[in-house]
Image: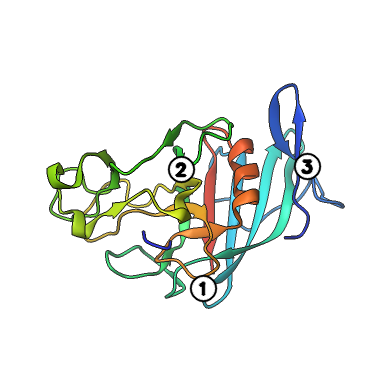
């Protein structure tokens, strides 16, 4: 969706980028989302702090339990704050637990464990409720797209220098929203996405592995 720190660091070890644990992090934490994320071992927690502002914490589960590996990252959410459920045309960030299936961006792949798609002028996110490819990435020239591009979003914009797809409305139900991403901030509220500083977003993308989720609450 359009338009759509707190210590935080990355360490390179055996060619795998990971996040460094925050000072004083405990391995026996029981975070608020613990009972809602199933078997996920990597969780990005987003908690609203008022309006379109939120706080992001990053957790990893190991043999001894949950560990906070980054804390207090400022984030922006929808201009309408948060909502219980996504709705097409409503600029609120839905609450719940969402998969993070793959990443994309106008910039080259920064590395990490997720599939990455480098996007250009012909990459779109189909937001047309009447389209059979609603709420999916499509590649086509604007004049040749089989969906309504006025209801969709071209992905070659600065806010998508780096982004991760959020698994919102995976059933692709018309009216239940499309195009929710974890992306580079432009400094303001989003239209329902979650946005943070690009440098920190890159560190998180490099850390993410398949099975990670984002947990969002107010």
Quick one: SS at disc 3?
loop
Give how far across and how far down residue 65 sits, in percent. Answer: 73, 41
The residue at which mark 3 appears reads as: 20
**Cβ atoms under marks 1 and 2 closer than 8 Å:** no
Q: Along the horizontal axis of the image, is 158 left or right of 126?
A: right
Q: Nearer the viewer, mark 3 or mark 2?
A: 2
The residue closer to the viewer here, 142 or 56, is 142
The reply to whether discs 3 and 2 touch (Cβ–Cβ < 8 Å) is: no
Q: Is residue 79 left or right of residue 49?
A: left
Whole-angstrom CA distance, mark 3 to mark 2, is: 25 Å
Residue 67 appears at what percent x and percent y? Answer: 74, 45
The reply to whether discs 1 and 3 touch (Cβ–Cβ < 8 Å) is no
Indicate the quadrant where residue 202 lies: top right
Give the CA separation, mark 1 to mark 2. 23 Å
Which residue in the protein does label 2 denote? 105
CA gap between label 1 and label 3 equals: 28 Å
Residue topped by disc 1: 52
| Residue 121 in sight from this viewpoint | yes
143 versus 16 height, above or below: below
Residue depicted at 48% across the width and 70% down the height: 189
Q: Which residue is at a point 68% across and 42% down the rendered structure image?
A: 60
Q: Earlier in the sequence, mark 1 or mark 2?
A: 1
Which is nearer the eye, 173 or 190? Answer: 190
**In terms of sequence position, does the residue under pointer 1 or pointer 3 come before the other?**
3
Where disc 2 sits, the SS reads: strand
């Amino acid at each position: 969706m359009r338009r759509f720190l707190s210590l935080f660091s990355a360490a390179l070890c055996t060619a795998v980028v990971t996040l460094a644990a925050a000072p004083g992090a405990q391995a026996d934490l029981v975070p608020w989302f613990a009972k809602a994320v199933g078997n996920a071992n990597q969780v990005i927690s987003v908690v609203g702090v008022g309006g379109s502002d939120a706080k992001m914490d990053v957790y990893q589960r190991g043999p001894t339990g949950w560990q906070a590996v980054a804390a207090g990252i400022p984030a922006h959410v929808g201009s309408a704050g948060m909502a219980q459920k996504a709705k097409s045309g409503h600029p609120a960030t839905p609450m719940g637990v969402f998969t993070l299936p793959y990443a994309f961006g106008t910039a080259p792949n920064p590395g990490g464990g997720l599939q990455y798609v480098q996007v250009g002028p012909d990459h779109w996110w189909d937001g047309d409720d009447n389209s059979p490819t609603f709420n999916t990435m499509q590649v086509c020239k604007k004049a040749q797209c089989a969906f309504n591009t006025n209801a969709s979003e071209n992905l070659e914009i600065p806010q998508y220098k780096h982004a991760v797809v959020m698994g919102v409305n995976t059933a692709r139900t018309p009216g239940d929203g499309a195009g929710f991403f974890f992306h580079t901030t432009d400094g303001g509220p989003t239209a329902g996405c979650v946005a943070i500083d690009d440098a920190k977003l890159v560190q998180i993308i490099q850390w993410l592995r398949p099975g990670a989720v984002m947990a969002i609450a107010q």
